[in-house]
Image: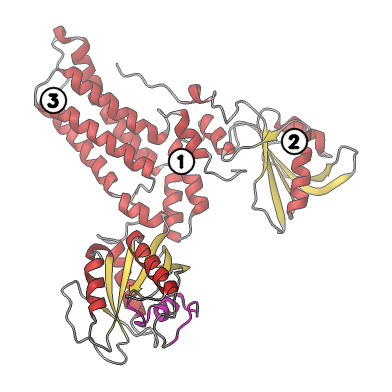
Amino acid sequence: MLLFVQTCETIMHLPDYQQPATIAAIATAPGTGAIAILRISGPDSIAIAQKIFTGPVDQYASHSAHAGHILAHDGSIIDHVLLIPFRAPRSYTGHDTVEIHCHGGSFIARQILTRILEVGARPALPGEFTLQAFLNGKLDLAQAEAVQMLIASKSELARQSACQQLDGALSAHIQSFQKELTRIAAILEAWVDFPEEGLEFTTLDELLLDLEKVLESMRRLHRTFHDGKAIHSDLSLCLIGSPNVGKSSLMNALLGKDRAIVTEIPGTTRDSLEEELKIHGMHFRLIDTAGIRETDEMIEQEGVRRSRQAMQQSDLILLILDASRPMAPNDTELLKLTPPESTIIVWNKTDLALPSTAIDREPAVLISAKNNQGIDALKEAIQRKIWKNGPPSKEEVVIASLRHFQAIERAIESAESASAAIKENRSPEFAAFDMRTCLNHLGTIIGTNVSEDILNSIFSQFCVGK
């Protein structure tokens, strides 16, 4: 029968993340503020806090707040603080944990951290508190990754999606796949182990039908990666066009501020300008590029080269055309260079004239960047281009991690291989092997089957203190 080994037993020997240990770090961002928070977690947390705090920490109830002083080694006061113990297992990490809330400022927080390390803790590595939570079963691996996604979220859609994954919505999907696939795999294993018994748990047709149902659910989740990436990634939105078509004016109109220099002189923009932009809950990196044209001027040539490079690497391109003049050969060449599936045609300067040239592409957007006309219609067009089938609902579970996408893709391939083996009436060993492989790939998503390298890669991307 199938054997699943919990990862916690193996990753206790991770070379970079020592276990068990009492660790400490500053949990708030550096800089001046009202308060800073330090976190201690591990078996000696209470004893370490007792050595530096003026109150009887070992007698405090869990989740209770206490005012007091942090003392230096000579007994002098470092700061007036609030101390909160979180006793195991009712803590974020599952270990005894102590939070110290001190006055804001990097110097004070560093002084207290130095004192904590002097009396027995070691500095926490990036993501080590969340790793402890994973090892102690407080979070599965997908939920642990959602913590980092939540911290990094730059839009309301990203926040909602990360919270959903942190609450276990993605994990529940994976576990439902595992449950049904394990049942199917168990039947196949029984046929392998006891062929002479003639066991009849189900018919082959019923088994194939059940497997196809799970496969279709997995494929649906797999297809959400486009939406998940759009929600959580910094999408690049590139403004491309010939010189003096109004790219910089459009950048200013989209941002609602004068970010780019606008003149009547062609070639004013010599380098790419970048700004952050939010449109309907999506976060974009807006790039204004130099006008693309043939030129002998060395600096402008470099700007044109960078424009072409930005165009090739962008998620979405706005190709700006001047409606007040006939299309030039350079405009026609740009139409050929820009891929239709990721390009929106924008006719600018429609306050002067309407376009006289018909373009054999989807309906273009008419704007006047100078007069701020048509900007809302352009934003709607951008939203439609990103969401091929409309934005996902709040309830829809999407995958945003390339690691999850690849794991589900491999799981689907293995399950399809098992289905083919059953249909071709091959020996059940082949299908059983494919099912075990499928389940292993799914296990890497929530951490029931994952290597040390993957864990080090995931948690090393966290900030220290989380």
Inspect this view and state whether residue 394 appears: no
Q: Which amino acid does label 3 sit on?
A: Ile
Find the distance from the CA under tag 1 to the CA under tag 3. 35 Å
Asked if residue 464 lies left or right of residue 409, the reply is right
Question: What numbered label is drawn on residue 445?
Answer: none
Q: Residue at x 25, y 77 (%)?
A: 331
The residue pinned by badge 3 equals 422
**Of marks 1 and 2, the one in the foreground:** 2
Q: Does the magenta stretch include residue 64?
A: no
Q: Which residue is drawn at 46% across and 55% down?
A: 159
Q: Is mark 1 on a helix, strand or loop?
A: helix
Dot 1 or dot 3, earlier in sequence: 1
**Is 37 located above or below residue 360 in the figure?**
above
Give the image location of residue 43, x and y in percent.
Answer: 67, 27
Dot 2 or dot 3, earlier in sequence: 2
Question: What numbered label is drawn on residue 143?
Answer: 1
Q: Determine which quarter of the picture holds residue 105.
A: bottom right
The residue pinned by badge 2 equals 117
Near mark 2 (Cα within 10 A), the count class, few <14, some 14-19 or many ≥20, is some
**Is 273 located above or below residue 146 in the figure?**
below
Q: Please say if the residues under marks 2 and 3 sit with CB atoms less than 8 Å apart.
A: no
Find the distance from the CA under tag 2 to the CA under tag 3. 60 Å
Residue stretch rendered in magenta on the structure: 242-263
The C terminus - image quarter: top right
Q: What element carries label 2?
A: helix
Find the distance from the CA under tag 1 to the CA under tag 2. 29 Å
Give the image location of residue 2, x and y in percent.
Answer: 31, 19
Give the image location of residue 84, x and y in percent.
Answer: 71, 42
Q: What element carries label 3?
A: helix
Dot 1 or dot 2, earlier in sequence: 2
**Is 108 located above or below residue 193 in the figure?**
below
323 and 182: which is toward the camera:
323
